[in-house]
Image (spheres, helix red, strand yellow):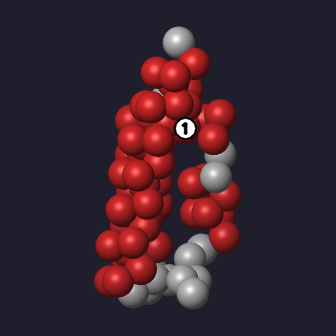
Amino acid sequence: MLSLPPAWLAELNDQPALVADPDGRAAVLAELAISAHRRSDVDTDQLADMLEFAEAARLWALIEDEETA
């Protein structure tokens, strides 16, 4: 099982913020992931997973917003 930073996961799970600003929140998630990697809190594989999750969350939010419109 992946062990990702709890603060980053909390940001990832903030669904209302994601739906309100999918691109902006994905950018924040990516920056937080890169910062965690620079601090050596996560390794390269975890960074890659975090970036993929951020993009998946962005796409989910775009679809969710489209479905509620």
Q: Secondary structure at mark 1?
A: helix
Outermost residue, top side? 69
Q: Position of residue 22 (x, y in %)?
A: 45, 35
Total residue callouts: 1
x and y percentages locating residue 27 in the rendered image = 38, 46
Would residue 31 be visible to someone looking at this image? no
Quadrant in the picture for the N terminus: bottom right
In depth, the one of 59 and 8 nearer the eye is 59
Q: Tell me if 34 is positioned left or right of 9 in this view.
A: left
The vertical placement of 13 against 19, above or below, is: below
Residue drawn at x 46%, y 83% is 42
In the depicted view, which residue is nearer to us: 16 or 68?
68
Residue at image point 47% right, 41% down: 60
Q: Position of residue 13 (x, y in %)?
A: 64, 52
Disc 1 designates what residue? 18
Front residue of 32 and 21: 21
- Disc 1 crowd rating (10 Å Cα; few below 14, some 14-19, many 20+) is many
Q: Residue at x 46, y 73 (%)?
A: 36
Q: Can residue 16 be seen from the camera position used here?
A: yes
Compared to residue 63, the image places residue 36 above or below, namely: below
63 shown above or below 46: above
Amino acid at pointer 1: Leu
Residue 33 sits in quarter: bottom left
Tell me where residue 34 appears, x and y as whole percent.
37, 67
Q: Is residue 14 left or right of residue 56?
A: right
